[in-house]
Amino acid sequence: TDGMQRPDRTRVMVVANQKGGVGKTTTTVNLAAALGQLGQRVLVIDLDPQGNASTALAVDHHRGVPSTYDMLVDGSTLAEVATESEELANLWVVPATIDLAGAEIELVSVVARESRLHKAIHGHPLVGSLADVGEDRFDYVLIDCPPSLGLLTLNALVAGEEMLIPIQAEYYALEGLGQLLETVDMVKQHLNSRLTVSTILITMYDARTRLAAGVADEVREHFGDTVLKTSIPRSVRVSEAPSYGQTVITYDPVSPGALSYLEAAREIATRGIKA
Ligand code: ADP
Ligand code: MG
């Protein structure tokens, strides 16, 4: 670790984009591993029934394992469902089992259905300020959302203060973003006034194509400083890592993908929480 400063209070970051395949899960697990390696204490909540983040972080997510579902639907506490990673430093995970696929419908009849995750996270004894909670405090909670704007993602947007939107550097990159930002505005107005889009990360950037450069320029024009200076390059090492139950940070620590996620993690940490 390089003694990176810990944030004043736990930063709850929602990794969301209703488009599939833009790099939400890849970004969640690699940023988590990078932040952990930099000495930050990180909790990943897998909110996608597919459980890809759980797989990539090598956490058991068979049916019956304590999971996000139990927390959202059955009212288990976050402490009851979080497990410490055996492979990665400073990392805890709440896995997603296939049961989560039914949660979207089961939650409809539950009281305060859109704030279940908020309640679970903010009720955890290790979430809060360092002064109040102590050294064991979680510095970051990263929530990996499914590719939709349903009740699961809504729970994340109500629970979080910051949103991290991965944008894939390809032709249709900006399509659907309008709808996403409208949803954020709706949540801000009615459910969580503290929510901000704090971070946009350009993923799968292919420096050899003019298209990627054009898309990146366009995203920066639209979103200015919200976009991290670091982009994540398209790299086969990044996509291979999950099949070994690893993040690219451990699978190939000197690869461009690993170095970029480490750099992105540093950038996020030094920016802090935007006022
Ligand atoms: P999402 O969670 O938004 O659906 P994923 O993180 O699962 O997206 O990424 C979609 C696919 O793209 C996965 O197969 C993943 O391995 C691959 N991928 C993501 N980022 C990169 C990258 N930087 N280079 C190469 N492949 C990537
Ligand atoms: Mg995913």
Image: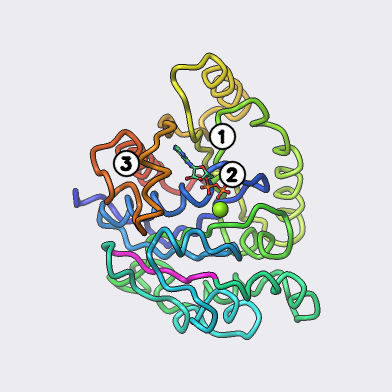
Give the x, y percent position of residue 54: 46, 64
| Label 1 to label 2: alpha-carbon separation | 8 Å
Residue tagged 3? 258
Question: What residue is at 70 percent from the left and 49 percent from the top?
Answer: 184
| Label 3 to label 2: alpha-carbon separation | 19 Å
Q: Is mark 2 within 8 Å of ligand 1?
A: yes
Instruction: Say left or right for 271 vs 153.
Output: left
- How dense is the environment of label 2, judged by Cα within 10 Å: few (below 14), some, or many (20 and up)? few
Give the x, y percent position of residue 91: 34, 65
Pointer 1 with pointer 2, Cβ within 8 A: yes
Give 126 or 263, whichever is nearer the viewer: 263
Residue tagged 1? 168
Give the x, y percent position of residue 258: 32, 41
Give the x, y percent position of residue 179: 76, 42
Mark 3 secondary-structure assignment: helix
Question: What residue is at 54 percent from the left and 57 percent from the top?
Answer: 144
In the image as oriented, which residue stretches furthest toward the right?
A: 109
Q: Is residue 24 magenta?
A: no
Question: What residue is at 77 percent from the left and 59 percent from the top?
Answer: 190
Under mark 2, the amino acid is Gly
Q: Is residue 95 magenta?
A: yes
Under mark 3, the amino acid is Ala
Give 60 or 24, whichever is nearer the viewer: 60
In the image as oriented, which residue stretches furthest toward the top?
A: 210
Q: Is residue 71 above or below residue 34?
A: below
Look at the image and give the residue range highlighted in magenta: 90-96
Tag nearer the camera, 1 or 2? 2
Mark 2 secondary-structure assignment: loop
Give 4 or 21, whichever is nearer the viewer: 21
Q: Is residue 120 above or below residue 274?
A: below
Which disc is residue 46 wearing?
Answer: none
